[in-house]
Image (tube, rainbow, N blue to C red):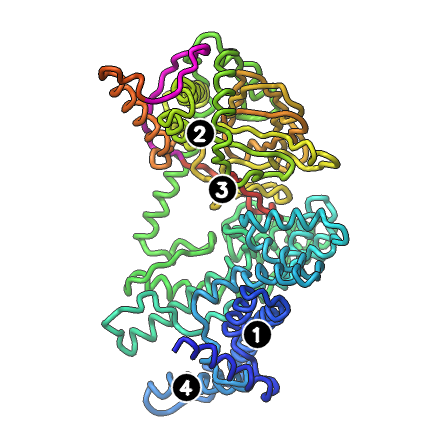
């Protein structure tokens, strides 16, 4: 029985060889390609995977073309009046459309359309560009570097959080014989390239060029939207396949039709979401018209500027600045000049409103749910119960604004002797500070001793020796691991406790300075050392840690940071407590959003704590450690109790257990090394909780800034 799927594939492949024009189902080609990949048959794998991608594209093209053709050949509206029962009038054209689609797809695909119904898992793989992941390895093994690089880049564009592919891309960049032209997206969508070029020209006040590229983008985006909508008319996706009670005729028709309408509505998010991003660009179509209106006005073409303004007002009819612009254009062109919105935009808005009306009816009366993708949907279309939720969201946003304003207040420091060496103003930014004398020289030495004793235990990011650069060796230690090593007698108990106490002291300092009265929890605590590998320093060009933000995906060219997974979106503040300075390089630096313009630098030294908010206002990186060993305590904090560091809770339990044992006769001599020649200060250790705090995106930040490449934190 296990050989049956393989036999079916062979029969289909044989039939394809004798049937010109037949399209072999892409899921079968993909499955066979993956088998060849794991059998290390690289040539066969590359061939089948490429054919699978070609088949996938061909199937989508056939579906789009057939639905467009049958929409013309078997139209529902505009035909001669029909006599007879209403069911024949309603369903007769439906049956004709179904017949047209079956015949068209059968002739284009060379087989029954049902043969091309792949599983959800396979469809998701192709949507995520997974075949290119296999292809790049196959091409590399075949010594076809140019094709390997293109496949790798195509996959990485859609999966920027994929750490292994990121490393592979960096390796390709360092290889001789690899050209910059090889790094191309084989699945690139034309409207995104044109849109970003148009926005760049717009920002540079090059309005003639901006107009040309933005018009191109708008045309391509509307075309992509129609293609996406056509693909919505496929088989119904059953959310609950085990449902026993099947719906009746009209319920089934209504459910499938509403599913198609919701799919069509979501198409605007698909075209407005750049590959590799999760969040769509808000108001993607209206923003084209807004930019075009201004650009046409700047180049002196008031007729087209007025047309774009009128088109924009179809989305936002009460937008006061645009209404003022329309008055200005009427005055300049003369009241007799007719100004109308573009016909294609009128059709787009009317059709979308018709679909929304039907969907919201189903929401109110049939128990459907709907996440409206548009900000411009008129209030009168939305049921009252959904309006209430919208008002609650607005109130929540107001509270977040107050929270941000409250963050600007500064509290007194809870420990004597600590000095604020640099504040936000001196560091050319916001929510940044440097404290000195947080630790003594003796405490730094004790913690360095702990890193030497426990560093070989590993616990680096994802168990990799060099997670950020191959030129340095990385060693890390968590608080729980330190306590476990102390239990086993591998390190001094006092050093392990000092690790816990020093990090808690830092937390109290950061909390009192940035968020007085509002509890900060640890999100993660890591004692880390980066050691320069002497033989790997020649010609080195990289950083010890690339520029990034701690709770969002940094997009330098779009001048934005997207607070969405895989970023650690719950992090609110970050800190680094340095232990030494006897090394070369390794300084912390802050940049503008472009990741290139350095705004501040911090030189490590014993007892120096640098703290900052974790968001887009503080992109930062670490210069390469070119000689020696740099050790520091990396600290991340959150207001969210549910994201508090669980390892820390367990570490404190180990200490409490140790205290109980010490109360017993001879209990203090049972476990743990004791280096009596070194001493550590006793610092308080505590834990607690507070309500979470959300992050607020700057209003309008999506209107003109678009992502180019997302950069995520990849520590763990």
Q: Earlier in the sequence, mark 2 or mark 3?
A: 3
**Secondary structure state at the residue bearing disc 4:** helix
Secondary structure that dominates the magenta span: loop
Q: Residue furthest top?
A: 417
Q: Residue at x 37, y 84 (%)?
A: 91
Per the model, the C-alpha gap separating discs 3 and 4 is 57 Å
Give the residues in magenta: 671-693
Q: Earlier in the sequence, mark 4 or mark 2?
A: 4
Q: Which residue is mark 4?
A: 95
Label 1 vs label 4, nearer the camera: 1
Label 2 vs label 3, nearer the camera: 3
Label 1 vs label 2, nearer the camera: 2
Q: Residue at x 69, y 52 (%)?
A: 197
Q: Position of residue 215 (x, y in %)?
A: 67, 59
Q: Which residue is mark 3?
A: 462
Between 160 and 84, the one nearer to me in the picture: 160
- Circle 4 residues within 10 Å: few <14, some 14–19, many ≥20: few
- For the residues bearing labels 1 and 2, Cβ distance under 8 angstroms: no
Checking the image for residue 55, the label placed there is 1
């Amino acid at each position: 029985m296990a050989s049956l799927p393989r036999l079916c594939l062979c029969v289909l492949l044989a039939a394809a060889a004798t049937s010109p024009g037949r399209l072999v189902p892409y899921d079968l080609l993909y499955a066979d390609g993956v088998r060849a990949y794991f059998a290390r048959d690289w040539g066969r794998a590359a061939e089948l995977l490429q054919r699978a991608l070609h088949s996938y594209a061909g199937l989508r093209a056939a579906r789009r073309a057939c639905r467009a053709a049958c929409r013309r050949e078997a139209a529902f509206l505009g035909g001669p009046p029909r006599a007879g029962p209403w069911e024949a009038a309603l369903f007769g054209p439906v049956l004709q459309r179904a017949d047209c689609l079956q015949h068209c797809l059968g002739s284009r695909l060379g087989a029954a359309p049902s043969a091309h119904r792949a599983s959800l898992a396979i469809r998701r793989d192709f949507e995520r560009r997974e075949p290119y992941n296999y292809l790049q390895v196959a091409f590399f093994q075949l010594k076809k570097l140019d094709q390997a690089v293109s496949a790798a880049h195509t996959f990485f564009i859609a999966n920027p959080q994929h750490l292994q592919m990121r490393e592979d891309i960096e390796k390709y960049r360092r290889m001789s014989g690899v050209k910059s032209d090889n790094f191309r997206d084989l699945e690139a969508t034309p409207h995104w390239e044109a849109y970003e070029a148009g926005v760049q020209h717009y920002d540079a006040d090059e309005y003639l060029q901006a107009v040309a590229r933005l018009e191109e983008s708008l045309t391509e985006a509307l075309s992509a939207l129609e293609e996406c909508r056509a693909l919505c008319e496929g088989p119904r996706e059953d959310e609950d396949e085990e449902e026993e009670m099947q719906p009746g005729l009209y319920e089934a028709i209504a459910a499938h039709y509403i599913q198609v309408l919701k799919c069509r509505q979501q198409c605007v998010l698909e075209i407005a979401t750049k590959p590799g991003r999760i969040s769509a660009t808000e108001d993607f179509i209206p923003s084209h018209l807004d930019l075009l209106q201004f650009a046409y006005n700047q180049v002196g073409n008031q007729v087209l500027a007025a047309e774009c303004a009128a088109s924009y007002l179809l989305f936002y009819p009460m937008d006061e600045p645009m209404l003022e612009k329309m008055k200005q254009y009427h005055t300049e062109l003369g009241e007799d000049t007719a100004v109308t919105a573009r016909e294609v935009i009128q059709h787009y808005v009317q059709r979308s409103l018709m679909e929304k009306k039907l969907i919201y009816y189903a929401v109110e009366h049939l128990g459907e749910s709907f996440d409206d993708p548009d900000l411009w949907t008129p209030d009168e279309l939305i049921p009252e119960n959904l309006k209430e939720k919208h008002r609650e969201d607005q109130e929540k946003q107001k509270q977040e604004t107050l929270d941000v304003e409250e963050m600007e207040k500064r509290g007194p420091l809870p420990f004597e002797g600590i000095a604020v060496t640099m504040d936000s103003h001196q560091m050319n930014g916001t929510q940044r500070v440097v404290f000195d004398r947080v630790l003594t020289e003796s405490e730094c030495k004790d913690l360095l001793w702990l890193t030497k004793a426990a560093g070989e235990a590993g616990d680096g990011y994802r168990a990799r020796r060099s997670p950020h650069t191959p030129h340095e060796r990385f060693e890390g230690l968590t608080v729980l691991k330190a306590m476990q090593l102390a239990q086993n007698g591998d390190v001094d108990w006092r050093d392990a406790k000092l690790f816990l106490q020093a990090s808690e002291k830092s937390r109290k300092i950061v909390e009192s300075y940035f968020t007085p009265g509002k509890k900060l929890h640890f999100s993660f605590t890591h004692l880390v050392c980066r050691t320069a590998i002497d033989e790997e320093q020649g010609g080195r060009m990289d950083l010890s840690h690339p520029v990034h933000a701690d709770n969002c995906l940094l997009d330098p060219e779009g001048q934005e940071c997207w607070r969405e997974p895989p970023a650690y979106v719950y992090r609110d503040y970050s800190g680094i407590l340095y232990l030494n300075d006897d090394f070369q390089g390794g300084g912390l630096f802050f940049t503008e959003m472009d990741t290139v313009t350095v705004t501040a630098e911090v030189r490590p030294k014993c007892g120096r704590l640098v703290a900052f908010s974790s968001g887009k206002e503080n992109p930062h990186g670490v210069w390469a450690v070119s000689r020696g060993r740099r050790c520091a305590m990396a600290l991340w904090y959150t207001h969210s109790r549910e994201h508090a560091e669980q390892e820390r809770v367990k570490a404190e339990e180990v200490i409490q257990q140790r205290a109980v044992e010490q109360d017993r006769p001879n209990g203090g001599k049972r476990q743990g090394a004791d280096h009596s020649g070194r001493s550590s200060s006793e610092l308080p250790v505590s834990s607690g909780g507070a309500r979470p705090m959300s992050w607020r995106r700057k209003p309008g930040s999506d209107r003109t800034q678009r992502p180019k490449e997302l950069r995520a934190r990849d520590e763990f």
